Amino acid sequence: MTRVKERRTALRHPKESGDMTRAAGNRGGVPVRPEVEKVLNSIRPALQADGGDVELVDIDGGVVKVRLLGACGGCPMATMTLKGGIEAALKERIPAVERVESV
């Protein structure tokens, strides 16, 4: 598998087990910081492999605000990484996430 395919696979399918859709971790349908951090930590190696990283800035209702760091910060593909990778992984694992914004 090529490096690009490996990265895409890692972004779409976090390797960590556990379902974060359970009511115990989702207080009233609002994503909880530890849940979001866990998902971000599972995709972080794929970003770091290309010289980038992601930082959780804030959670406002169902909106997760992140900052792309390193190579990801100025990459022309950053929007695709944000929406197709980070947002997709978060929505898949935490249904209360409505969208992800870069700040």
Image (spheres, rainbow, N blue to C red):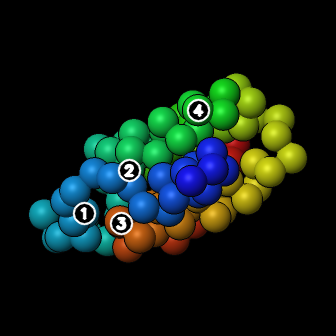
From this view, report whether residue 18 is shown above or below residue 37.
below
Please name the residue that numbered disc 3 is placed on: 94
Amino acid type, callout 4: Ala
The amino acid type found where label 2 is placed reads Val
- Closer mark to the observer between disc 1 and disc 4: 4
Residue 96 lies in quadrant: bottom left
State the quadrant of the C terminus.
top right
Secondary structure under badge 1? loop
Q: Residues within 10 Å of mark 4 (few under 14, many from 20)?
A: few
Q: Which amino acid does label 3 sit on?
A: Ile
**Label 1: few (<14), some (14–19) or many (≥20) C-alpha neighbours in 10 Å:** many
- Judging by the rendered image, the residue that carries numbered circle 4 is 49
- Which mark, residue 20? 1
Task: Give the left or right position of residue 5, taking residue 22 as reference.
Answer: right
Q: Which residue lies furthest to the front in this view?
A: 1
Residue 19 visible in this rendered orientation of the protein:
yes
Q: Please indicate, yes or no, whether residue 33 appears anywhere in the rendered image.
A: no
Callout 2–callout 1 Cβ contact below 8 Å: yes
Q: Is residue 82 above or below residue 92?
A: above
Q: Mark 3 or mark 2: name the one nearer the start of the chain.
A: 2
Label 3 and label 4: CA atoms lie apart by 25 Å
| CA gap, disc 1 and disc 3 | 6 Å
SS assignment at label 4: helix
Of labels 2 and 4, earlier in sequence is 2
Front in this rendered view, residue 98 or 38: 38
